[in-house]
Image: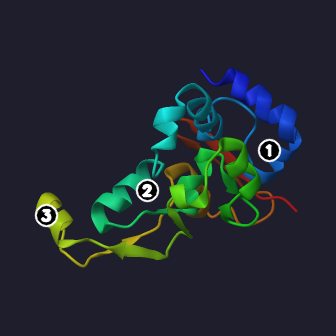
Amino acid sequence: RAQKEVKDIVSELGAEAVHNISGKPADVTPCLYRCRWLSTHMPKVWAKTAKTAEVHGGLTHFLTGQWATSTASADPMGLLDVGAYDWSDVLLKAARLTREQLPRLHRPGEIMGEVTAEAAKLTGLKAGTPVIAGGGDGQCAGTGANTFLEGRAYVNLGTAAVSGSYGK
């Protein structure tokens, strides 16, 4: 659906710049391009969009009442500056988003909030339980496989195949 938006953003920023900022190749997978598509093809809906988040951001909001997410969870959105661990102003502008429309970012291991009384009633979790930023299985597989030394590599086979290696 957003193939034209991929071409438009690549024309504006350059494929290498998009990849260098986000760590993602220019294709329709990241929501960067779908946000642009929505703003172009559904402007009335887009104008009313107060927040947009990935699944973990929505779940964190449900549990804590706060819009927050992990940088690891936000990474696939294609809007993150992977070198700065922050939303990229350049990519947000290309997506026609503002920082206020996105969840607050936390590094994995940081406390994002606590389970509210309302969420506790709905889930059976204890109110006040800390909600901690985490990472995906593929992202954490390298840590679990101890691939911190030169020459080590891993393959994680799940919903997708993820591999990684540690080099100089």
Mark 3 nearby-residue class (10 Å; few <14, some 14–19, many ≥20): few
Residue 146: give x, y in percent of width and height: 63, 64
Q: Which residue is mark 1?
A: 18
Mark 3 or mark 1, earlier in chain: 1
* Label at residue 124: 3
Mark 1 or mark 2, earlier in chain: 1
Q: Which residue is mark 2?
A: 57
Residue drawn at x 17%, y 59% as measured from the top left: 123
Mark 1 nearby-residue class (10 Å; few <14, some 14–19, many ≥20): many
Residue drawn at x 59%, y 38% as measured from the top left: 35
Describe residue 19's horizontal placement relative to residue 147 as left or right. Answer: right
Residue 1: give x, y in percent of width and height: 59, 20
Towards the viewer: 10 or 29: 10
Residue drawn at x 80%, y 44% as measured from the top left: 18
Q: Secondary structure at mark 2?
A: helix
Q: Are marks 1 and 2 in contact (CB under 8 Å)?
A: no
**Amino acid at the residue labelled 3:** Gly
